[in-house]
Image: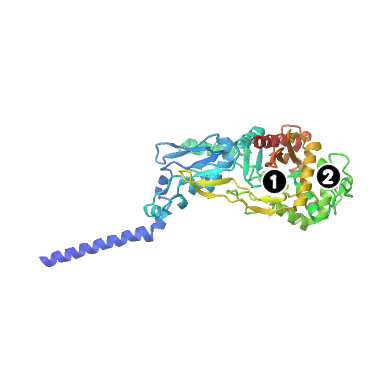
């Protein structure tokens, strides 16, 4: 009888050992497989089982979390959702995350190990820290001014602090309310279908994802190339370029909208935006020189993120001389985001130096302790400081007595460049109205803000659309909001 008891005990011990081995196999060897299985909803349930951290603008949260009482318990809420949607993006239980909600997801969801003083303990217990916060660089007054200025028109605004690269405003219109995508009910699916199917593309972030022909605003880049290369040594000397200008190797003649561009000086050509002068200067600088200068400002950079991805602005490097002439006045294949053109204006304002644009000042724990602070860096030197000084004077003249007078601010120094970009088959599309600028307070040593504005559907007859008329007043309102602060 004792022998049978011993056998039974040994068999039970063997079964227990087998169970322990199997448990270890499941929890250690196959843990990754089970964790990554689409049918495993434990991570998703845990993710929405606690409030999400907030995105802050001007020290105040523009996001929140509301208790739905459902299985995915906490849903994202937004304050002034359409105003900040080009920055926050959305956080949806159904459709995932976008923009800052995506780029800073680990911090906001509380899964970033740096949020916990004991990250290994969290790994062992599979616990999450409370969601951290993302402190943005946005100036709320500038953001509101940009959004109000664009109104019901399609377009975008990007504003930077030239000396640091801090993004002060980032607006795209039309916009949408990201809270419509929070939750799991049928209304979310209907909102997703409606927003993605809308002809005016409210979910397209025009400030950083859409590229446009920059038109005459690109003449700032061409002027920098001409001055840095020595093609132009004196901004008041005649350029010896005719009006009209025949594109090299072509019978096509380029003309101007204004008089006096034949053999005009760079100062006059910049002030009145003479196409013929800048097309000719681009050809004289040559493809290599134009390519190098454009790259210095940030064109053809495919790695820029703020921290979410920015579409690359492009300057075509495979062009003949006629195409180079058109590229040098912001046409042909030259394309730029509003953020890129704000970087161009900022480089002029910051002694030729392009600072790395960034949208996040720092990330913090739920208690407000800093986890990560953005280090301000110089991205590139776009031009020499001497050239930057000359361009500041040219942009200042364009505002005081040229095409940018609508951007003038009493008591402040403002420099700007307008642009009207043709597009479509045979340039049949309604032109885009551009304006780029910078502003310096009377009692300040350096410019405080650089702005780029593009308006897609200007409310005017085709012939009356202009950057100085449609986009400059918006830039003025944004700059004034920053200076008033």
**How far across and how far down the image is residue 16, in percent?**
25, 61
Name the residue that disc number 1 marks.
Answer: 346
- Residue at position x 45%, y 43% from top? 367
Q: Nearer the viewer, residue 269 or 67?
A: 269
Q: Are marks 2 and 1 in contact (CB under 8 Å)?
A: no
Residue 45 shown left or right of residue 293 in the figure: left
Q: Is residue 251 visible?
A: yes
Indicate whether 291 appears above or below 270: below
Determine the CA span between mark 2 and mark 1: 20 Å
Sequence-earlier tag: 2 or 1: 2
**Mark seen at residue 267:** 2
Q: For this view, does 125 lie left or right of residue 258?
A: left
Judge left or right: residue 162 versus residue 322.
left
Q: Identify the image's colour scheme: rainbow, by chain, secondary structure or one colour.
A: rainbow
Up/down of 338 relative to 232, above or below: above
As helix, strand or loop, the secondary structure at mark 1 comes to helix
Q: Nearer the viewer, residue 41 or 375?
A: 375
Q: Residue at x 63, y 40 (%)?
A: 169
* Residue at 40% in and 38% down: 70
Q: Is residue 237 above or below residue 189?
A: below
């Amino acid at each position: 009888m004792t022998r049978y008891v011993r056998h039974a005990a040994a068999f039970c011990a063997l079964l227990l050992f087998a169970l322990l081995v199997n448990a270890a196999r499941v929890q250690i060897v196959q843990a990754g497989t089970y964790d990554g299985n689409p049918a495993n909803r434990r991570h998703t349930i845990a993710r929405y089982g606690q409030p999400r951290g907030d995105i802050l603008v001007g020290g105040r949260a523009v996001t929140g979390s509301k208790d739905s009482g459902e299985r995915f318990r906490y849903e994202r809420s937004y304050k002034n959702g359409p105003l900040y949607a080009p920055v926050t993006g959305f956080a949806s239980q159904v459709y995932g995350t976008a923009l800052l909600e995506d780029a800073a997801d680990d911090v906001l969801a509380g899964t970033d190990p740096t949020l916990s003083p004991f990250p290994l303990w969290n790994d062992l217990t599979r616990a999450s820290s409370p969601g951290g916060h993302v402190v943005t660089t946005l100036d709320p007054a500038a953001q509101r001014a940009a959004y109000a200025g664009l109104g019901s028109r399609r377009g975008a605004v990007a504003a930077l602090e030239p000396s640091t690269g801090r993004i002060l405003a980032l607006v795209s219109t039309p916009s949408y309310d990201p809270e419509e995508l929070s939750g799991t009910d049928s209304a979310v699916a209907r909102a997703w279908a409606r927003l993605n199917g809308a002809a005016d593309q409210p979910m397209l972030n025009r400030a950083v994802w859409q590229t446009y022909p920059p038109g005459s605003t690109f003449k700032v880049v061409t002027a920098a190339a001409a001055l840095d290369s020595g093609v132009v040594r004196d901004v008041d000397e005649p350029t010896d370029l005719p009006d009209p200008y025949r594109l090299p190797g072509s019978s096509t003649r380029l003309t101007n909208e204004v008089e006096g561009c034949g053999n005009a000086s760079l100062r006059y050509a910049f002030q009145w935006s003479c196409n013929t002068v800048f097309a000719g200067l681009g050809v004289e600088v040559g493809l290599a020189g134009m390519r190098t200068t454009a790259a210095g400002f940030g064109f053809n950079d495919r790695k820029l993120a703020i921290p979410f991805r920015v579409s690359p602005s492009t300057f075509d490097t495979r062009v003949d001389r006629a195409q180079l002439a058109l590229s040098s006045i912001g046409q042909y294949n030259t394309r730029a985001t509003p953020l890129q053109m704000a970087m161009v204006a900022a480089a002029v304002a910051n002694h030729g130096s392009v600072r790395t644009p960034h949208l996040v000042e720092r990330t913090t724990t739920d208690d407000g302790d800093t986890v990560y602070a953005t280090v301000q860096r110089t991205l590139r030197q776009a031009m020499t400081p001497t050239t930057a000084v000359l361009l500041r004077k040219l942009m200042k003249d364009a505002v005081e007595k040229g095409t940018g007078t609508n951007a003038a601010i009493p008591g402040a120094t403002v420099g700007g460049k307008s642009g009207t970009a043709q597009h479509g088959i045979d340039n049949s599309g309604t032109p885009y109205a551009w304006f780029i600028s910078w502003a310096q307070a009377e009692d300040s040593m350096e410019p405080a803000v650089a702005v780029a504005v593009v308006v897609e559907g200007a409310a005017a007859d085709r012939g009356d659309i202009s950057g100085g008329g449609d986009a400059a007043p918006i830039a003025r309102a944004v700059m004034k909001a920053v200076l008033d602060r």
